[in-house]
Amino acid sequence: MALLIAQLLTGLANAAALFLVASGLSLIFGVTRIVNFAHGSFYMLGAFIGYSLMQVLPGHFWFWASVLLAGIAVGLIGVIVEICVLRPVYKAPELFQLVATFGVILVIQDLALLVWGAEDVLGPRAPGLKGIIRIMGEPVPKYDLALIAITPFVLFGLWYLLTKTRIGILVRAATQDREMVGALGVNQAWLFTGVFFLGAALAGLGGAIQLPKGGADLMMDFNILAAIFVVVVIGGMGSLPGAYVAAVLISVLNVFGVSYLPQSTLVLMFVVMAVVLMIKPYGLFGREEVAGEHGQVGEPERPIKPADARGRMIVGCLIAALALLPMFDSTFLTILITDILIFCLFAASLHFLLGLGGLVSFGHAAFFGSGAYVAALLVSHAGTPMELAFLLAPLGAGMAAVIIGWMCIRLTGVYFAMLTMAFAQLLWSLVFQWGEFTGGDDGMVDIWPAEWLSTTNAYYYFTLVVGVGAIILLRHVAHSPFGYALRASRDSERQAEATGINTKHVRWAAFAFAGAMAGVAGGLFVFSKGSVFPTELEIAKSFDGLIVVFLGGVKTLSGGVVGGASLELIKDFLTRFEFWRLSLGVLIIVVVILAPEGIVGTVRKLAEHAGWMRSKNAREVTGDE
């Protein structure tokens, strides 16, 4: 009993920092509807800034003053991010703002590396709270008890701010109906800025307050990112009580999981999230109207006609140029273009799901990795010929998508996205921990193509034919009756149902088809590299796909392909420099601000404008009105 109480207290103490960070994210989403991926970066900055302040301000009083000052400093940094990065794109598709926050992550990572260096720092002990207290004979750190005592006061303070003050009333009103608040004359821009300051400051406080327990390092932003999103989604997007309950639940379960079921710690919180969302689709305290708004990706685009003769000619010339590439260039460029083609197919499969179906998946890499591992396992353990293993790769990925899609498709918006991430994390954990079968962290190696594809050029042409063929198939399906039914389900579910379209079945089929196409890319990848590792199923891979889709243009059929090719070429160039993340992050932010419709959408708009200007000039010359 004593041990159980000590573990419970440890879980409650761990929940303190998690709640602070998650409550800030919940506030920001509730008012601005922005899924702020940079929130983990604010947490990291709070830890580093707090550490620096504690080095120059020693003493009991100044320890807590440093924690508060770190929160305020991070809040001000959040204001700069909101004004300079997010405010210019508030009118862009909501999920496109996700890309901007990812660019902020890259910028902050390299700036933190530049200021504090690559070494981890150990946080100082809290003055007056060193040592332990024995409870029923079990040691419990004094600082843990202090955190347990502080957290309810923070929750009460936030509750009082939001329910008893005019600012809080405006914040709650904006959470429920932003348009009405604007119609009443409230300056929404500064309201958003104030909420962003508070949310970022809470994240900074969370980072600083955990210093005596964990210190600071450059990976802590990514390490906490998944946890805070899980907490916010379990509690319900925009709900502070929900964030508190979920933080306590996740932290306590993790402590007991480490002690009694250590293999579960990699996925325990995702399992809890999946169970909660299948029982309560909008979290413990969430509301459907808050979740539903997030599922949009902007206004429906104008109907896209199939490619005309000119478009087919351009594509044909590009394919011909790619076919001639090995005859005139080096092996390095051939391998690079092979990688780009594979990644473009992966991005195109995600774009099919997101652009046509409005379904934002945070776990699409699960199907890319599934295709790769199915092929690798068949070759390695069953001695299957490469050709048959490659054909079965998309079948295995498609079956995984059928199962996962059946459980996810009834949700919408960010809840759908998070549930796909949960199941992707479960697959990753299975591959990572089943070492005797999948190789675990060591991956699977020596998975090479058949003899007739063993040369670089031969496999390049194989990838070109299969990759381009699969992309063309995706485009063909987009213009089929199924593709138009999928768009109808996205644009107006109620009207689509009224015309006899079973929107859930259409989305489920689209989810499975997109997963199978990602499996084709995974099969190409594993035989291209001769190996596969669990990193191909990680969340970061899915985020890479999302980024290129938004950069290329959500409202275009070629957005995924153009975005994938552009990002891969840029990364290949920038990664040769030391602070390449800073450059890439700035580039992403600039593209988001200057070209919110993506590369393809912006080029199309410029072309249309140029055509209109030529037509206008022609009318002026001829005197026509």
Image (cartoon, rainbow, N blue to C red):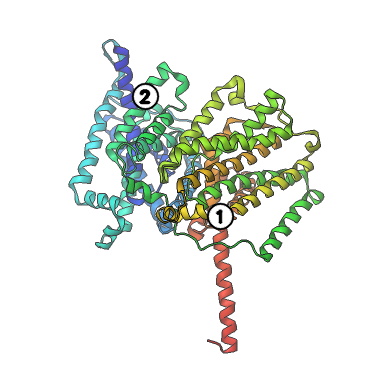
Kind of residue sitting beneath label 2: Leu
Mark sitting on residue 481: 1
Q: Residue at x 51, y 60 (%)?
A: 595
Coordinates of residue 370 in the picture (x, y in percent): 59, 34
- Residue, x 54% and y 23% (percent of image)? 433
From this viewpoint, is residue 207 visible? no
Q: In the visual, does 125 lie left or right of 61?
A: right
Sort mark 1 into few (<14), some (14-19) or many (20+) by Cα contacts within 10 Å: few
Q: Secondary structure at mark 2?
A: helix
> Would residue 171 be visible to someone looking at this image?
yes
Q: Estimate the x, y position of residue 398 in percent, counting from the top left.
A: 58, 38
Q: Which mark is residue 253?
A: 2
Q: Quadrant of residue 159?
A: top left
Q: Where 396 sits versus 466, above or below?
A: above
Q: Nearer the viewer, residue 584 or 422?
A: 422
Q: Is residue 382 left or right of residue 206?
A: right
* Residue 334 screen position, x and y as percent: 74, 45
User: Would you place residue 624 above or below residue 208 in this image?
Assistant: below
Lower sequence index among marks 2 and 1: 2
Q: Count the numbered circles shown.
A: 2
In the image, what residue occupies the spot 48% across and 58% down?
593
Q: Residue at x 40, y 33 (%)?
A: 273
Q: Amino acid at mark 1?
A: Pro
Work out whether residue 243 or residue 192 is closer to the camera in this orientation and state it: 243
Using the image, tell me which numbered label, if any, was put on residue 192: none
Mark 1 residue element: helix
Q: Nearer the viewer, residue 135 or 44?
A: 135
